[in-house]
């Protein structure tokens, strides 16, 4: 079973400037908690027991968020604010560990993943990009289904989502012989970055969730710089395909690109109206705006 997950959080968040000038984009709140907490909980729900943050010197607040704050905990306990105390001490279960490694230079997603090589060791692992929130529509989350599929087949899993055909030139699009049903995987022939509409092999875009074999770390070590003069994870996956089956898993949930400002606002709206404590009042506020 997959028990380790890499979350690359070292990026500068230029799409979220000016806020990301001083606040890590992963720490911008979606309703009442930072975006990265949703991603961590998604991983935990899929059975992950060790979260590896690939981080940067400017992202200490992310590490601090998942650490204990004894002064705050003591204050809440003395004031008998037990509900709040439970919320901040139970962000992740006790059997889940969160550790950090540094990415010394911004050399791409593939390089960020490679920075965790010593921690991963010989274990297969998942990668979750924290820019994207995945909101589930079924009892079992999509990542858990990818992990189960990997355990059955040993085929790397790439999460994909159907997008409108006229928008395919904005995404990495997978090349497949047949379109899978939601919740199913099919063999993937490759990934085409931002193809023109008339040349796109499908309308299935890569989401930012991967389940990968440990051997891809060795591939990344010898992967030359590609697009943007960076080490690209997609290039390493293409090399992996020369010897191993790689599958595209079509997700069932809904995605929100919190790296973009409009995507973030959409996430706040959707998570806000379903919030267990604030949802009803939030809906009422929206109705009162009479937009």
Image (spheres, rainbow, N blue to C red):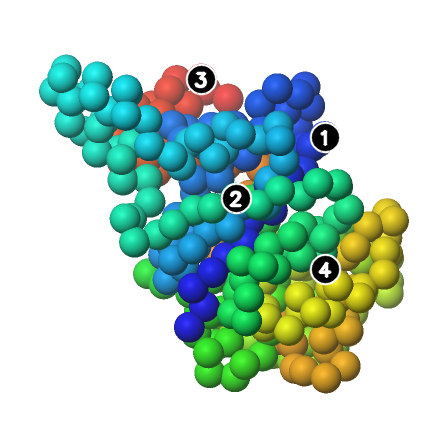
87 left or right, relative to 34: left
- What is the quadrant of the N terminus in the image? bottom left
> Is label 4 or label 1 in front?
4
Count the labels in the image.
Answer: 4
Q: Are marks 4 and 3 in contact (CB under 8 Å)?
A: no
Q: Which residue is mark 1?
A: 14
Q: CA distance from mark 3 to mark 2?
A: 43 Å
Q: Which residue is mark 4?
A: 233
> Is label 2 or label 1 in front?
2
Q: Residues within 10 Å of mark 3 (few under 14, many from 20)?
A: few
Near-viewer residue (250 or 77): 77
Going from N to C along the chain, the mark reached first, 2 or 1, is 1
Residue found 81% across the figure and 64% down from its top? 223
> Is label 4 or label 3 in front?
4
142 left or right, relative to 72: right
Q: CA distance from mark 2 to mark 4?
A: 20 Å
> Is label 2 or label 4 in front?
2
Q: Which residue is mark 2?
A: 100
Going from N to C along the chain, the mark reached first, 1 or 3, is 1
Please give the label number shown on residue 102. none
> Is label 3 or label 2 in front?
2
Residue found 60% across the figure and 55% down from its top? 116
């Amino acid at each position: 079973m997959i028990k380790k997950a890499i979350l690359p959080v070292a990026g500068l968040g230029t799409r979220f400037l000016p806020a990301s000038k001083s606040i890590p984009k992963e720490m911008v709140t979606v309703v009442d908690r930072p975006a990265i907490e949703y991603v961590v909980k998604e991983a935990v729900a899929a059975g992950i027991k060790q979260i590896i943050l690939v981080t940067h010197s400017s992202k200490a607040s992310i590490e601090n968020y998942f650490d204990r704050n004894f002064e705050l905990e003591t204050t809440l306990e003395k004031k008998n604010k037990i509900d709040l105390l439970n919320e901040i001490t139970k962000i992740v279960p006790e059997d889940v560990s969160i550790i950090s490694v540094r990415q010394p230079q911004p050399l791409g997603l593939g390089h960020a993943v490679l920075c965790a090589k010593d921690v991963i060791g010989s274990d297969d692992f998942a990668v979750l990009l924290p820019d994207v929130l995945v909101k589930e529509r079924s009892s079992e989350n999509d990542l858990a289904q990818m992990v189960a599929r990997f355990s059955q087949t040993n085929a790397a899993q790439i999460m994909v989502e159907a997008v409108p055909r006229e928008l395919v030139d904005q995404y990495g699009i997978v090349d497949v012989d047949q379109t899978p049903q939601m919740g199913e995987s099919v063999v993937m022939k490759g990934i085409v970055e931002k193809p023109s509409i008339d040349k796109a092999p499908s309308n299935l875009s890569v989401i930012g969730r991967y389940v990968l074999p440990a051997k891809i770390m060795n591939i990344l070590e010898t992967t030359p710089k590609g697009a943007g003069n960076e080490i690209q994870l997609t290039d390493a996956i293409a090399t992996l395909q020369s010897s191993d089956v790689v599958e595209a898993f079509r997700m069932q949930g809904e995605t929100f690109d919190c790296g973009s400002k409009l995507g973030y606002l959409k996430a706040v709206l959707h998570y806000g109206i379903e919030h267990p404590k604030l949802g009803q009042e939030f809906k009422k506020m929206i109705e009162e705006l009479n937009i």
